Amino acid sequence: MPNKKETSALRVARSAKSVSAAVFLSRIFGLVREQVLAVLFGAGTQMDAFVVAFRIPNLLRDLFAEGALSSAFVTVFTEYEQKKSKEETNRLVSNVFTAIFLILAAICILGMVFSKELVLIMAPEFSQVTGKVMLTTNLTRIMFPFLLMISLAALLMGLLNTRGYFFIPSFASSCFNLGSIIVGGGLAILIPSLGYPAIYGMAIGTLAGGALQLLIQTPAFKKEGFRIRPFLDLKDPGLRKIGKLVVPAIVGLSATQINIFVNTNFASRCAEGSVAWLNYAFRLMQFPIGLFGVALSVATLPMVAKQAAQGRISELGDTLVSSLTLAFALTLPAAVGLWLLAEPIIALIFQHGHFTYFDTQMTGQALKFYAVGLMAYSAVKIIVPVYYALNDTKWPVVASFISVALNIVIILLTLERFQHRAIALSTSMTIIFNFVFLSIILYKKIGGYPVARLLASLFKIAISSAIMAFAVILTQELFTYGSGMSALLLQVFSGVLAGVIVYLASVSVLDLKEAREIMSKIFKIVTKT
């Protein structure tokens, strides 16, 4: 058990460190997966088709696996652990797993049957390229069962998090990437000899990765005494409570996903390769989002759920501010670094095989505009689950609808001039609005939280990030951008190293409490290993 004298920042950091380590591995493997795709397929027709095909079940996955269902289930399960018997809690687990399995199996079947219609809704302009709709449709049918496997894996993750398991559930996503790389990459090389497009191999690899992500968590699940038996009681109060939370929560947590759907539709209207460019850029964005935002969200959710269940609202507010401060301290400098080093980073990672210098430029432009919203992406992943811990689904729903409408308006006003860059910029602007809106409403709802402390910390983080930016720019002037791998590696490494050193020195001089605490924690971990 954590020491009672620990601050909220240290308690969150203690849990988040395991998640961050596991997510770091996952993001590394994720980048390798994207490298495999870039080398084999570049940013052409096959890659556009794969991105859209994977995005269709993945949008639902984001809602269920990392959003509404997971948050609602953890909230109700925590209440049962606090107030109900072990038998009632285990009964809830079996009931939820059975219900979700049946619902998602039905969705997968319907999705596979109507794949062509879904493709035409998401990317109507694909019909302008011969064979592109059919290719995307076939890929969608192959990958749709991924939704079922990954959603069940998310339920296991939520249960294990409440029991103090953070590394294994977070490491499970590494297994998905490994499955995609090994099985997908291998089949992509072999399957053309059978007369099928190479990209089919990556689709099959996606299923293999989803299965691995589910299976890797089952030993710890069984170790904690959980047993799932087929059982369905639609009148069960716990299941109904989850249902009441999850239906509006799906909308409330879906602003980013709905916007991605809209964005894909608009991207299909831009130049060939635009869908792929945006995908590669957003994948790079997901590295810091996953490493910091998701890690802090996963670590924070069980804590705020328990505080909400016990009525400790003041502590909940303190935990929220500590989590947001840590997220800002990590993501603002990351955003600045991504803006300044976008092209050399992309060239270093992706510019191989079929991925050209032109693809690097186009992807870099998208990454810069995505970076504008990096802080807000991570913050929303932290603040939205707090609403569901408080059993409030109204305001996330309102924010969701406003954000979607705002996104469409911004894209319509800027698409002709900025093309695919308009989509990245609009996504960032809407997520910033989403965070600000929800922060204000939550402040009023819980009677306030230490916002002055948060703003003071943010000011220090911004100053430190600005100083860091000058250091990175100065460093880049000393190293000429070249096409060789050694020159790119030197440019990226020197920029990142200078940025990290200067930023850490700046936050130390400005005495940012949360950053100092987490750096102390990291130092202790490093010195023990």
Image: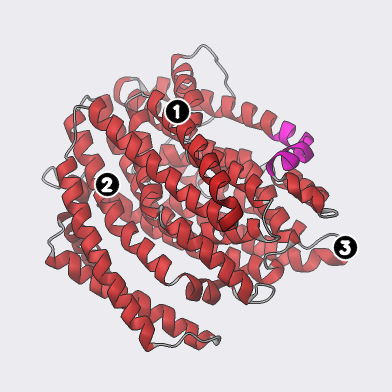
Question: Which of the two discs, 1 and 2, sits closer to the camera?
Answer: 1
Magenta: main secondary structure: helix
Pointers 3 and 2 in contact (C-beta within 8 Å): no
Secondary structure beneath label 2: helix
Task: Tell me what residue is drawn at x 20 percent, y 46 percent.
Answer: 454
**Label 2: how many Cα within 10 Å (few below 14, some 14–19, many 20+):** many
Task: Tell me what residue is drawn at x 68 percent, y 68 percent.
Answer: 42
- Placement of 335 over or under 227, stated as above or below: below
**Label 3: how many Cα within 10 Å (few below 14, some 14–19, many 20+):** few
Question: Which of the two discs, 3 and 2, sits closer to the camera?
Answer: 2
Secondary structure beneath label 3: helix
Image disc number at residue 241: none
Task: Tell me what residue is drawn at x 42 percent, y 66 percent.
Answer: 338
Disc 1 versus disc 2: distance between alpha carbons? 23 Å
- Placement of 76 over or under 155, stated as above or below: above
Q: Which residue is label 1 attached to?
A: 397
Secondary structure beneath label 1: helix
Disc 3 versus disc 2: distance between alpha carbons? 51 Å
Residue 120 inside the magenta-drawn segment: yes
Q: Which residue is label 2 attached to?
A: 323
Q: Which residue is label 3 attached to?
A: 194
Residue 23 in the image: x percent, y percent? 43, 56
What's the magenta region? 108-122
Residue 478 in the image: x percent, y percent? 36, 88
Residue 212 in the image: x percent, y percent? 59, 51
Residue 468 inside the magenta-drawn segment: no
Image-based side of 442 in relation to 39, left or right: left
